[in-house]
Amino acid sequence: MCLFGASGHGKVVRDVALSQNKTIKVFFDDSPKANLLNETPILPLSKLNNFLDNSFLISIGSNEIRKKISNKLNVSFTTLIHKTAVIATNVSILEGTVIMAGTTINTDVNIGKHTIINTAAVIEHDCSIGDFVHISPNATITGNVSIEEGTHIGAGAIVIPNIKIGKWAIIGAGAVIISDVPDFATVVGNPGKITKYKK
Ligand SMILES: CC(=O)SCCNC(=O)CCNC(=O)[C@H](O)C(C)(C)COP(=O)(O)OP(=O)(O)OC[C@H]1O[C@@H](n2cnc3c(N)ncnc32)[C@H](O)[C@@H]1OP(=O)(O)O
């Protein structure tokens, strides 16, 4: 398979693939810092046509950029799940999504496309996680929470049960979310307070 984005996140996604004995043939990146990333070649997008029979994943941390790239490219996207992730019964994970090492996803959870569930995050039962979301390392999403498209949950944040978080919101690292969050809001602190809205 091949990855779009030869970044720090790209390296970690490559390791998720390796944990499942999958090999990354190539990173595609139009502004790479080198020709190789941990011995994997980096090519410009103009070479994509030679690799179209592979499956792909966008290994870029920005939710906005993953959305833009996925809308532009007509390739076959796959999911990647680290071998140490614990995934319960009745969990749905759509294409383009990556599940990092040490995560736990409990039963009756739906996860959209091109989403990142980062290292050691916990997604409890009956949650709905939208497309292009990023749940950062060690975040805890408790039961029955819904998180809409494009939202970023910072490292170590905690969301209590039955909360709804709108689209393209940002939850700061370490925040504790005890009430619903509107679309485009940035929320920080314990208890979480809105500091601004994305323009
Ligand atoms: C593998 C990986 O690395 S995955 C990446 C994971 N990334 C993260 O977890 C990053 C999460 N990002 C944050 O927490 C950021 O600080 C954000 C997005 C919440 C805020 O960023 P900005 O909009 O640039 O805010 P800025 O830094 O200007 O701070 C604004 C105010 O919020 C406060 N603030 C910012 N972040 C936090 C936070 N996490 N908790 C509490 N207060 C915070 C600042 O102290 C500042 O307060 P002041 O106005 O009283 O001085």
Image (spheres, rainbow, N blue to C red):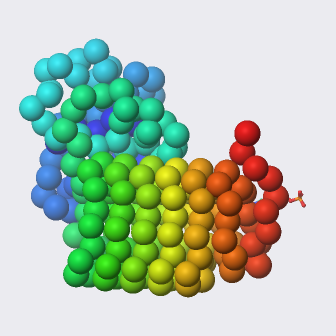
Is 37 or 55 nearer to us in this picture?
A: 55
User: Which residue occupies 30% across, 48% down?
Assistant: 96
- Write down the quadrant of residue 80 in the picture: bottom left
Split into 4 quadrants, where in the image is the N terminus?
Answer: top left
- Write down the quadrant of residue 40 in the picture: top left
Question: What percent of the width, then of the height, locates residue 171?
Answer: 65, 63
Question: What percent of the width, then of the height, locates residue 103?
Answer: 37, 74
User: Which residue occupies 34% across, 52% down?
Assistant: 113
Q: Horizontal placement of 179 versus 160: left or right? A: right
Toward the left, the furthest residue is 53
Instruction: Dividing the image into four quarters, tell me where ligand 1 lies.
Output: bottom right
Above or below residue 67? Residue 30 is above
- Write down the quadrant of residue 159 in the picture: bottom right
Question: What percent of the width, then of the height, locates residue 38?
Answer: 31, 42
Q: Is residue 72 visible?
A: yes
User: Which residue occupies 14% across, 28% down?
Assistant: 52
Q: Is residue 86 visible?
A: no
Above or below residue 114? Residue 111 is below
Q: Horizontal placement of 183 versus 139: left or right? A: right
Above or below residue 65? Residue 186 is below
Split into 4 quadrants, where in the image is the C terminus?
Answer: top right
User: Which residue occupies 44% across, 58% down?
Assistant: 130
Question: What percent of the width, then of the height, locates residue 195?
Answer: 82, 58
Is 76 or 51 nearer to us in this picture?
A: 76
